Structures are given as structure tokens and as C-alpha cells.
Amino acid sequence: MIINTNVSAMNAHRQMGANQNAQQSSMEKLSSGLRINRAGDDAAGLAISEKMRAQINGLDQASRNAQDGISMIQTAEGALDESHSILQRMRELSVQSANDTNVEVDREELQKEVDQLSEELDRISETTQFNTQELLDGTLESTFQIGANEGQNMEIAIDDMSSSALGVGGNEAASFSEDGTVTTDTDQTEFTDGTYSVVEMEDYEGTDLAGDAEVGSGAAADVSHLMVDSEGEAIAVSDGGTQFYAYDGTDNNTNGYNDIEFNNVPAEVTVTEGGTEAVGDIEITDSDLSAGTYSIADISNDGTFGDNWDVGLKDANGEIVALGATDPAGGSGNSATSADLVTNWVDTADTTSTVLEHNANDQFGFGDTIEVSGNGIDISSQASADSAITDINDAIETVSAQRSELGSFQNRLEHTISNLDNSSENLSAAESRIRDVDMAAEMMEQTRANILSQASQSMLAQANQQPQSVLQLLG
């Protein structure tokens, strides 16, 4: 018999330790509910489940993002619902004013409400926000992250819903840039009473030009002034007052001015450039002019500027009208208040040439954005009220189109949320099968480990008693 090495006790001790470890592991899993509590439990399963967990978290956040997007859309759409109500009321007032049972004072009162409604459209456009973001002023271009991975997003933009953008309020005639181009912003064709001022002006060097009207005797009627681009296309026809200015000198192309000839004072004139007809018939407000030659500048759109410019835009009092001016020596732009300063604005979708302005000191400069204060919807007469109905119809259609687009976005996001939630649910089930513990199976394992642990303890005790039998041999 061997007493120095008790192999039975050693084996029982080893088994008892293994059983205790198994019992401890089972208790950990049962208490946490997880099959994988550490990488050692299942290294590959841990890696797979962590990727799934990242995807699940991304899907859940994308679903919340889509819900936030719906909230933003509902905020904008709710504001546009009120804009719709305002436009419907404006149309109702226009229809009422178009009826000649109303007299002038009645229409004045109706116009007051239209003006207030137009201002409210602007207020809604300017103040509707979601999380401090402007929604209806035309600046919103948002991207919604509606997926768990890169590039899974949706873009949304909301147009300018102000009264001017809808064609029923103050208008912005055109934007002038420093490269010698001008682009129109809206298709409004009429401005009502208001103050017309230049917002920003750029300074350019130039010289004073002495101008004198070359109209004959008896030419005291108003005349429409014409601005053309380098291709001879009309840019604007304006009510300019009692004088048409003609200037001696060269234009920015240094090839002299082109002429407009009024032959026998017709009701319409033809603009020619270099002897070739460049523009069709241009209507003038009154044709009480003598025959003669009237000069305008041949303005290029190549971004270059000369010293001398010609645009004659003054009213009967010699005040600058509509487009303002900047002093080439660095002065600021002028503004003027008058009725119906601009009677026609020829809309153009393409970039045309630079339009320059003339100020009260017979100096010329380069203009920038022109803003108009006042309302584009005029129901102060039967004719204007009748015309306003069409303008308001167009505005209603614009708002309807925007609301329809927002509604389609909302419906899409609702389907997106359903899909994201379904994907998250299925992926969570897959991740659970890898990472979560089967409680019933683990309880059986824990019971087995507990019994084995108790048995190993008993066997260890008996193994420790075996060497004592040697003492009987000594007795």
C-alpha cells in the first residue's frame, strides 16, 4: 500500500474542482440570462452577436430618426394647412372685390385684409421651425438617416412658402452678381405701391455722364424705358417718367451706343442693335413723342465693365425709380417711393447681361438684389381683383403640391419605420439565439453540476480515509 501519494484523493479533488466550476458557470448564466457572458464562453458566437447587436442598435435609432422626421414634416405640413386657409380667404376676398356691386371704399377695406393675410403668410414662412430649423423659408435641405448603415438616408427639401414666392406678396425683382450676370427670381409681372430700395451695392469706378433728352417738342407723356442684354433681348420695360435720357459716349464694349428709333411716333417701337432687329415690339405707355433717336447702352455679359454706362430710369420728378443706383465714387444706393414704378418685368429663365442703374447725379453703378415692400395681390379694382383670382389659384396649387410632397414623405417614413422595426425584431431574435441562455437546459446542467459536486466531495472524504488502514497493520 502507498501512503505518500493518494491518487484517489487527487482524482476526487480534480473532479470536485471541475464540478464546482461547472456549477459556478451555470449559476452565472442563470443569474444573467446570457449564454455568453465573456469571450471564453463562445469566442465566435460573441463576435457574431456583437455585429448583430450593432446592427440592431442602428436599426432602432434609424426608426427613431424616421419618427423625428415625421414630426418635422407634420410641423411644416400643419403650417402649410394654415397657409392654405389664408389663400382660400384671399381668393374669397378677390372674388368678392371683382363684383362691381362694391365701390372704391369697399374694395379698400377688402384690400386691407388681403394685405394683412399676405403678411401672415410671410410670418408663417419666417417663423415655422423644428428644433430651431427654419422650415418654410426655402432654406431647408435635410437628410434623414433612415438606415443602420452608411448611405441609407433620404433627402427632403421644402420650397419657400412666403407670399412673394407664392406670387401673392412683395416681390424680389432680380439678383445682380459681380460677374456681370442677372437672374430673375420670380415670375411676378406687377408691383403695387411700395418703397423700392437696393439692399446691397457694389462700388465700381466710373465717370459722370451728362445726359440730355433728344425728344422733340410736345414730348411730355410718360414713356416706357427699355433695358436689353448683349444679345439684344429685353430685360425690363419700366414706367420711367417724362424723359428718356440719351447719352454721348461709349458703352462697356467701347463700340458706341445702339439706337432706338421712334418713326412717326407709333404706339409700338422696334429695338434694333447694329441695324438688325433684336427684340420684338415693345409697348410704351403713351406714344406722345416726336420722331427721333434714343440711345441705350450695349451691355455685355462677359463680366467686364467700362467707364460709361447708360440706363435711363427716372420718374417725372427726376427721382430714381425701381432699380436704384450706386455712386461709382462709392456712394450708397438710392430709393424712391412711387406708385406703379415698374409696370412690366420681362421674366427670363436664363442668365442675361448686367443691368446698371442711374442715380440722381447722372452717375451709373452696378446693382445688387432689389427688394420690394408691398403686396403683389391688388384687389382695389374690378380688373385687378379678377386677375388676382388666377394668381391666388396658382399659389394654392403651389402649396397643395408642397403639402402633397410632404404627405408622400410622411407615408414613406411610416413604411420605413415598419420595415426597420421588423428587421430589428428578426435580427434581435437571431442574436438572442446566439447569446441568450436556455433557462430550462441550463437548470438541468446546474442540477447535474451540483450533484456531481456533492458526490466528488464525498468521494474525496473517503479517499482521504484510505491511508488510515495502514495503521491496522501496525497494531
Image: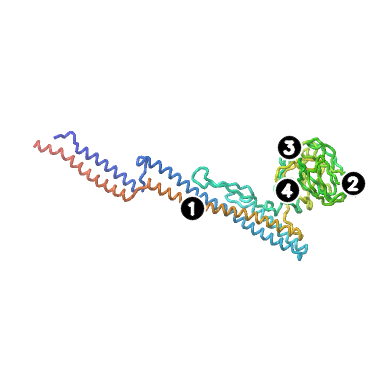
Q: Which mark is residue 347?
A: 4
Residues marked 3 and 2 touching at CB (< 8 Å): no
Instruction: Report crowding for label 1: few under 14, some 14 to 19, many 20 or more residues within 10 A (C-alpha).
Output: few
Which residue is located at x 84 percent, y 46 percent?
244
- Report whether residue 200 is seen: no
From this viewpoint, which residue is outermost toward the right? 217
Sooner in the amino-acid sequence: mark 4 or mark 3: 3
Which residue is located at x 49 percent, y 48 percent?
61
Q: Disc 3 versus disc 2: distance between alpha carbons?
A: 36 Å
**The one of 348 and 183 positioned closer to us in this rendering:** 348
Residues marked 4 and 3 touching at CB (< 8 Å): no
Task: Tell me the residue that label 1 is attached to.
Answer: 418
Q: Hey, what amino acid is under mark 1?
A: Ser
Q: Secondary structure at mark 1?
A: helix
Q: Hey, what amino acid is under mark 4?
A: Asp
From this viewpoint, which residue is outermost toward the front? 276
Position of residue 152 measured from the top left corner of the image (x, y, whole percent):
52, 45
Q: Secondary structure at mark 3?
A: loop
Q: Quadrant of residue 308?
A: top right
Q: Which mark is residue 216?
A: 2
Q: Disc 1 versus disc 3: distance between alpha carbons?
A: 55 Å
Position of residue 388 measured from the top left corner of the image (x, y, whole percent):
72, 57
Q: Hey, what amino acid is under mark 3?
A: Asp
Q: Secondary structure at mark 2?
A: loop
Position of residue 134 measured from the top left corner of the image (x, y, whole percent):
61, 49
**The one of 336 and 216 positioned closer to us in this rendering:** 216
Q: Hey, what amino acid is under mark 2?
A: Gly
Task: Tell me the residue that label 3 is attached to.
Answer: 302
Residue 420 as seen in the image, left or right of residue 296: left
Q: Quadrant of the N terminus?
A: top left
Sooner in the amino-acid sequence: mark 1 or mark 3: 3
